[in-house]
Amino acid sequence: MNNTRIVATIGPATNNAKSLLELKKAGMSIARLNGSHNSLDWHKEVISLIHRVLPDTPILLDIPGRKIRTTQLASEPQFDIGDIIILTTDISFDGKEKVPVNYENLHNDLEAGQTVLADDGTLKFTITKITGRDIYLKAETPGCLKSKKGINVPYVKLNTKLVTERDRLMLKFAQENEVDFIGLSFVESKEHVQAIRDIINPLSYPRIVSKIENQGGINNMEEIIEVSDAIMIDRGDLSMETELDSIALMQKEIILSARRYAKPVIVATELLHSMIENSFPTKAEVCDISNAVLDGCAAVMLSGETAIGKNPVEAVSLMTRVVAKSENYLRKKENVKLLNSTKLTSAIPVAIGDAIEVICNEAIVTKIVAITRSGFAAKALSTRNLTQPILAISDEEMSAKSFNFFPGVKGIYFPEKFPKDNLDHVIKILEFLRNSNELTDEDLILVTAVGYPNSGSRMNMIQTHLVKDLAKTFHWK
């Protein structure tokens, strides 16, 4: 198994049991659904299918959030350079005369002369005038404005609500259907993340993947990373909302900052875009995947390639091979320049992490067992690019599944609550792992856990064991 995770978007091309199993075999680690497309009934059926066919695979549901899109259109207007297209915030129109958008106050936030981009920047317009709820656009490119396509206005701050009623509905839906992660669009502040977390509480799920995709997100990157569970770099919107020529540098800066906080980062958008139609990628796309891994991302994501593409399994398989080559390069000692500094709440877990890394590099440790309810240990160790697989054990079932997000980590659910006043569960867990064939008698394992936890406690214990010695000592059968 590669350390770097592969996120595959499930859509009309792959929403069946056969395709899901083939995607998993090819290397898919996380199944993504785009809440901006299809109905909630459709998503509910697909989530149920994934739970049934791939019960250990985490699900990431992108919720529309503050993303502006065209609505479902009865007529999708075609145009040439110089033609006038009318956007409107009056949703009673259907595209024949005017194209409605889902943000009711867009006409109040814009002015003549500004640039409007649509459909991932493939369509460009200039605002000529605004009359009432209507925004008149002059086409700078030919094309067709289709249903549910994104609308971007570079460098303009839109006064959208932090949390919409649609967000609340989607969050409730995600919880009711046991979705593991939600992707939160256009995050610009820690207050936005906290507002979503307040709705999720008192449940701890779904966990929040904040999408950095505009200048506001870049400006407040550090505070967003600190309060999020994970980060997604949506390069499609980010390249339109900021500067295309700086997109690679922004990717590196976001990943660098996230690694300091031990937060996983997904790199998304067009990694294998040509494979939507073609069976073979461009050389630039292959290089793009390798560079994302070398930058230190936790996951790379496929969107249209697996949702609507002609070659979904081939795209995942190719990405798996490219990731493997890139990780092998990283593991060569002369090329490893890892960033192990983390901004954590205590020096103890950092020191424990340093010690684990030294032990794993010096001794013949074959597997790491991280006993962790919340996943802190799994997350912290996954940033260190250790060669040993990490088995992360939790007594909370959804927590255990979510650990599969972290690079090099396999999440495992242990069906007994961890005690706070003794360490008896450690040996029980190791016997459980041996009985379930996760450990063999020949494994030399390193175990880390929280012993006698109090408020704010993190991993504070390290043990090493030869499994066959444990089996003999405790008379395991």
Image (spheres, rainbow, N blue to C red):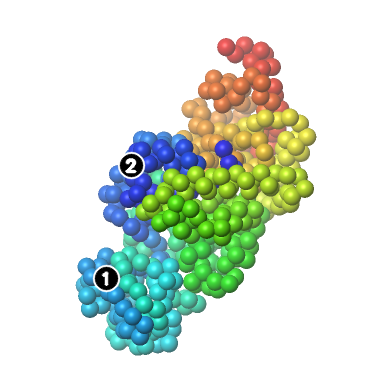
Which residue is rendered at x = 60% and y = 24% of the image? 439
Label 1 sits on what residue type?
Glu
Judge by depth and name the residue closer to the eye, 284 or 198.
Answer: 284
Query: SS for tag 1?
Result: loop
Identify the image quadrant of residue 149. bottom left
Q: Is residue 397 left or right of residue 429?
A: left
The residue carrying mark 1 is 76
Quadrant, the N terminus: top right
Q: Is residue 425 left or right of residue 135?
A: right
Which residue bears the numbered disc 2? 16
Q: Is residue 442 visible?
A: yes
Q: Position of residue 408 (x, y in %)?
A: 59, 40
Q: Earlier in the sequence, mark 2 or mark 1?
A: 2
Residue 201 location (% of width, % of height): 44, 49
**Residue at x-position 58% and y-position 72%:** 245
Q: CA distance from mark 2 to mark 1?
A: 29 Å
Q: Residue at x 60, y 65 (%)?
A: 248
Place residue 246 in its image quadrant.
bottom right
> Hey, what amino acid is under mark 2?
Asn
The quarter of the rendered structure image containing the C terminus is top right
Q: Examine the rendered structure and indicate whether residue 133 appears above or below residue 64.
A: below
**For residue 47, what is the image quadrant?**
top left
Q: Residue at x 66, y 24 (%)?
A: 443
Mark linked to residue 112: none
Q: Is residue 33 above or below residue 148?
A: above
Kind of element beneath mark 2 = loop
